[in-house]
Amino acid sequence: PSFRLLFLQLDVPKADLTVKVTGKQWYWSYAYPDNGKFEFDSLLAQDKQPRLLGVDNEMVVPVNKVIRIQTTGADVIHSFAVPAFGIKIDSIPGRLNETWFKATKTGMYYGQCSELCGKDHAFMPIAVRVVDDQEFASWVDAAKKKFASNPAGTYASVGQAAQ
Ligand SMILES: [Cu+2]
């Protein structure tokens, strides 16, 4: 029976939305190819609860929709795991892995990097905020302005500018 389940997990149903998740040392970046292709970084927020799980910019998705996750690594191997959705998939440089989930309730869901990836492996949480359709649409509108028009504001480019 477990093999049947493992097999079915890999069969990605028709997705309502795709989010591309890139694991980096030591944070995640989320890209929304279906919603204007904006991308943003999600960094551990020291001042947020729950401790070690709160981030500055959450991954936001609509409730009751099939969300396809495509994941890769930018530097070393990471792993994208969200226990509440039953997903765990390696984020490997040079490779695009796929998985999916469908959240049936709104709210916050958390996960952590699950492949030892260096110094701050324990400090690159995954925070997913599941919202209704209307809230998702307004978040997308705001996110397009906040992230797409200002690529210089992302963590990675701030790091490059400092070099
Ligand atoms: Cu990692």
Image (cartoon, rainbow, N blue to C red):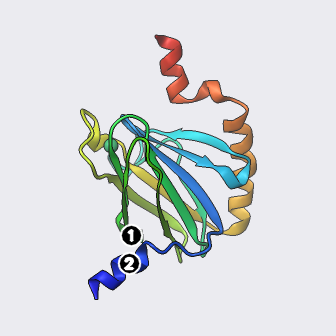
Is tag 2's residue or tag 1's residue first in the polypeptide sequence? 2
Residue appearing at x 67%, y 42% in the figure = 38
Residue at image mark 2: 7
Alpha carbons under labels 2 and 1: distance apart: 19 Å
Residue at image mark 1: 84
SS state under label 1 = helix
SS state under label 2 = helix
Task: Specify the amino acid type for callout 1.
Answer: Ala
**Residue 6's x, y, as percent?**
34, 77
Q: Is residue 11 left or right of residue 132?
A: left
Q: Does label 1 point to a residue whose CB lies under 8 Å from ligand 1?
A: no
Q: Residues within 10 Å of mark 2 (few under 14, many from 20)?
A: few
Does residue 135 lie above or below 139 as drawn? below
Does residue 4 lie above or below 97 as drawn? below
Residue appearing at x 40%, y 58% in the figure = 110
Task: Specify the amino acid type for callout 2.
Answer: Phe
